[in-house]
Image (cartoon, rainbow, N blue to C red):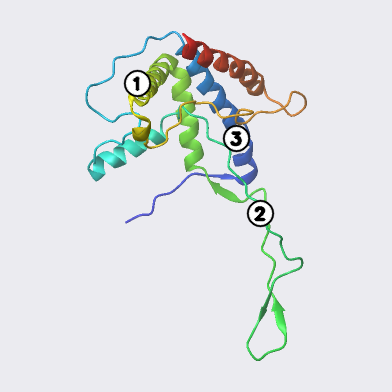
């Protein structure tokens, strides 16, 4: 069996593409939210997974197809910022190895630092590029996706409000698609910026306006 050949890019080029891909994804996501503002709430199916529940067990083949479809589709939610705990103190100097019965210790060889031309697996990067391109080519369809998610969220909120306080326990789900603070890939205006950063700054404010307008209407 032949091993699958994965596409690669030099490290410096992989990072350059990623620096523009993050704001492009965030801008496309906000365009979808703005387009979905005036869409009516679609009718939810009588059966199927709820906002809090999980889908029924599926076959391995259907699970694999579902995962492949998710990887090729632009996510509707911003990735949340990673929580960074307190930094642990790092011992200064080069680590050493000592052997029982030997008073001397041999220093470990320092790890080779990453080089700009090191090959990096670009499989995930290619999938993300394809996903954002598909979203921009068919924004109305993705706006419909967002409207369906919004309808499921509102239905779950209504259901939780009608429950008794002791029964309001369930799986936590996100109710806001935008992450707090600056959007992914944001850069301050000035040097080393790209037109995609200017677009992101504009649609970011519009997306917050669309979300607040939809939630209060």
Q: Estimate the x, y position of residue 40 in percent, counting from the top left.
A: 37, 9
| N-terminal-most mark, 1 or 3 | 3
Label 2, secondary structure: give it. loop
* Circles 1 and 2: CB atoms closer than 8 Å: no
Q: Is residue 67 above or below residue 149?
A: below
In whole angstroms, how far apart are the C-alphas of marks 3 and 2?
18 Å
Please tell me which residue is depicted at 40% across the width and 9% down the height of the picture. 39
| N-terminal-most mark, 1 or 2 | 2
In whole angstroms, how far apart are the C-alphas of marks 1 and 3?
39 Å
* Circles 1 and 3: CB atoms closer than 8 Å: no
Q: Give the image quarter of residue 209.
A: top right
Q: Estimate the x, y position of residue 45 in percent, counting from the top left.
A: 25, 21
Q: Is residue 189 above or below residue 206?
A: below
- For the N terminus, give its image quadrant: bottom left
Label 1, secondary structure: give it. helix
Please give the residue where the numbered disc 1 appears in the rendered image: 155
Please tell me which residue is depicted at 49% across the width and 25% down the height of the picture. 176
Please give the residue where the numbered disc 2 appears in the rendered image: 114
């Amino acid at each position: 069996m032949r091993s699958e050949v994965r596409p690669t890019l030099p490290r410096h080029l992989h990072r350059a593409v990623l620096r523009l891909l993050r704001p492009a994804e965030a801008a496309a996501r906000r365009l979808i939210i703005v387009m979905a503002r005036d869409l009516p709430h679609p009718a939810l199916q009588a059966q199927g997974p709820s906002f809090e529940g999980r889908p029924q067990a599926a076959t391995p083949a259907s699970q694999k197809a579902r995962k492949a479809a998710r990887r090729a589709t632009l996510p509707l939610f911003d990735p949340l910022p990673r929580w960074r705990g307190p930094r642990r103190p790092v011992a200064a100097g080069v680590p050493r190895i000592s052997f029982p019965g030997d008073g001397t210790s041999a220093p470990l060889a320092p790890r080779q630092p990453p080089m700009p031309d090191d090959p990096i697996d670009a499989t995930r990067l290619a999938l993300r590029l394809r996903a954002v391109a598909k979203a921009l080519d068919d924004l109305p369809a993705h706006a419909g996706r967002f409207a369906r998610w919004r309808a499921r969220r509102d239905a779950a909120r209504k259901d939780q409000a009608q429950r008794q306080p002791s029964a309001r326990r369930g799986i936590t789900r996100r109710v806001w698609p935008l992450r707090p603070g600056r959007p992914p890939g944001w850069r301050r205006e000035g040097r080393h910026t790209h037109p995609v950063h200017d677009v992101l700054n504009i649609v970011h404010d519009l997306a917050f306006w669309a979300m607040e307008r939809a939630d209060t209407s």
